[in-house]
Image (cartoon, rainbow, N blue to C red):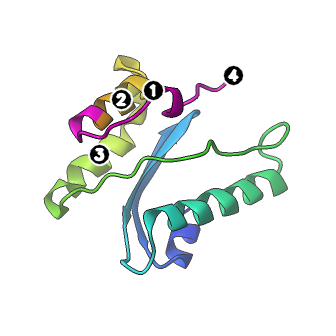
Amino acid sequence: MTGIVDQQGHKLLQIGGMPDHIHALVSMSPKQSPSDLMFHLKRSSSLWINENKFVKGKFSWQEGFGAFSYGKSQIPNIANYIQDQETHHKKRSFMEEYLETLKKFDVEYDERYVFKPIE
């Protein structure tokens, strides 16, 4: 994923995740929108995962994504948070955390379209 982000003209500062989601801290170039970057990131990584048969059946990402901006002084805290995903999710699920983040940033949302658990 680092290579994909780099190819798109951005800098990946931190990446990490769990079986049902990832977090990526990216220093974005103003030449591309977050949605365009996510299109390329999901497409290229899905192709690579499927070509290398890392999962049974066909791998695909869910539709949509969340993107939040942070100040430069917050980067170390966000990077540490991403590194420590396993510990965070012992305390609360990704869904709980994500909804809390949406509320914290005053993002209007419809819960039916936020996140679908892996079946």
Dot 2: within a 10 Å radius of its alpha carbon, few (fewer than 14), some, or many (20 or more) residues?
A: some
The residue at the point 68 percent across, 60 percent down is 43
Amino acid at pointer 1: Glu
Label 2, label 3: how far apart the Cα atoms are: 20 Å
Dot 3: within a 10 Å radius of its alpha carbon, few (fewer than 14), some, or many (20 or more) residues?
A: few
Q: Are marks 3 and 4 in contact (CB under 8 Å)?
A: no
Judged left or right of residue 2, residue 58 is right
Tell me which label, 3 or 4, sits earlier in the chain: 3
Amino acid at pointer 2: Leu
Tell me which label, 4 or 1, sits earlier in the chain: 1
Identify the residue under disc 2.
99
Label 3, label 1: how far apart the Cα atoms are: 28 Å
Which residue is at the front of the view, 13 or 69? 69
Residue 38 counted in the magenta span? no
Range of residues picked out in magenta: 103-119
* Foreground: disc 4 or disc 1: 1
Identify the residue under disc 1.
111
Tell me which label, 1 or 2, sits earlier in the chain: 2
Identify the residue under disc 4.
119
* Foreground: disc 3 or disc 1: 1
Amino acid at pointer 3: Asn
**Residue 117: x, y in percent?**
59, 25
Identify the residue under disc 3.
80
Tell me which label, 3 or 1, sits earlier in the chain: 3
**Residue 104: x, y in percent?**
22, 36
